[in-house]
Image (spheres, grey):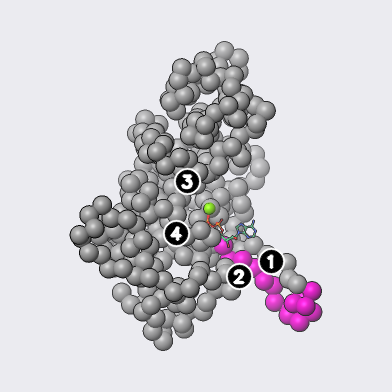
Amino acid sequence: MSEIVRVEHLKKYFPVQKSVLEQLFTRKKKSVRAVDDVTFSIKKGEIFTLAGESGCGKTTTGKLIVRLLKPTSGRIYFKGEDITQLKREELRLLRRKMQIIFQDPYASLNPRMTIGKAIGHPLEIHGLARGEEKKGKVLEVLQKVGLTPPQQFMNLFPHQLSGGQRQRVALGRSIILEPEFMVADEPVSMIDVSLRTTIIDLMLGFRKELGLTYLFVTHDLAVAKYISDRIAIMYLGRIIEIGSKESLFKNPLHPYTKALLSAIPVPEPKKKREVIELKGEVPSAINIPPGCRFSSRCPFKKDECTKTEPELVEAEKDHSVACYLS
Ligand SMILES: Nc1ncnc2c1ncn2[C@@H]1O[C@H](COP(=O)(O)OP(=O)(O)O)[C@@H](O)[C@H]1O
Ligand SMILES: [Mg+2]
């Protein structure tokens, strides 16, 4: 499989306003290290998932890739082309190929725009279709995302739909330009549990039907297990373990991954699983612990862990971990 997206040493630091006292006594700039040296690549057609607790930098990584944010440093490639420095007009063209959807479809839909208008809007912006042709495409997309009969949805407004239906609208709007790559940032976490699988299955269907590749973002390892081909586990802005879904779930290597997995409910409670409880809370991304950034919560911490940061090292085929203990 060929590579569609690649990021190298990607970083995003957000500056933090210092208090008056801090301004007087320190010259050092403070920043939130939201994404702190991340490297990975996504193959065409696969579903690559970024997983990890809230605040670990998943959304920031997704926004950097589609260039809604500018990286502090590092490189982003799309189909071999370096897109890190693209300017406005080039970015506009890129948006036809790369899309992003967020967890809250209500926030991303204009309340005064009908569903038909919202879905057709990208066609207008890019000057791709108008009038009857546009309407035809919108009806086709409504059908594809399961809002049927499509004519009935054309003139409704977002507030007249359920959360699941609104996410279908957001999906429709993101596929109408026939993109090749989509970042799906927690797309089902605000949707009623009973509807999550149907929305996920719809998205999985688009992979084949439209040849889409996904970067999927979720804090929910059960969702990650259901959809992913490969998974990267993030902690405080870094990838601490990455691998195929099979090897990561069968043989988790990082204590953090093990802890996350032991929190997922198992269908067969008889099967004993190693349970790891984490100490304390995630430290602030402003004050990242020295050495291994997970060391402050790691039940297996050794002296060396607080000295230098471990790099990702391949432990088995297509499975790497950043931990001195494994
Ligand atoms: N615009 C911003 N300004 C300052 N800090 C931010 C901004 N966006 C995100 N952050 C911080 O960056 C870190 C990573 O956030 P985010 O990427 O949203 O994580 P996740 O999606 O995994 O929950 C968090 O500490 C968050 O508070
Ligand atoms: Mg997020």
Measured as percent of width and height from the top left, residue 277 is found at: 38, 70
Mark drawn on residue 16: 1
Please tell me which residue is depicted at 31% across the width and 68% down the height of the picture. Answer: 275
Which of the image's four quarters has the C terminus?
Answer: bottom left
What residue type is disc 4 on? Gly
Q: Earlier in the sequence, mark 3 or mark 1?
A: 1
Which residue position is annotated with label 3? 189
Q: For the residues carrying marks 4 and 3, which lies nearer the camera in this image?
A: 3
Q: Is residue 158 left or right of residue 295?
A: right
Helix, strand or loop at label 3? It is: loop
What residue type is disc 3 on? Ser
What residue type is disc 2 on? Ile
Q: Is residue 160 left or right of residue 225?
A: right
Q: Earlier in the sequence, mark 4 or mark 3?
A: 4
Helix, strand or loop at label 2? It is: loop
Instruction: Classify 10 Å Cα crowding around label 2: few (below 14), some (14-19), many (20 and above).
Output: some
Q: Earlier in the sequence, mark 1 or mark 2?
A: 1
Q: Earlier in the sequence, mark 2 or mark 4?
A: 4
**Residue in front for this viewpoint, 3 or 255:** 255
Instruction: Classify 10 Å Cα crowding around label 1: few (below 14), some (14-19), many (20 and above).
Output: few
**Alpha-carbon distance for marks 3 and 1?**
29 Å
Whether residue 188 appears in this view of the structure is: yes
Q: Earlier in the sequence, mark 3 or mark 2?
A: 3
Q: Which residues are magenta?
A: 20-34
Mark drawn on residue 52: 4
Q: Is mark 4 within 8 Å of ligand 1?
A: yes
Residue farthest front in this picture:
269
What residue type is disc 1 on? Val
**Alpha-carbon distance for marks 1 and 2?**
8 Å
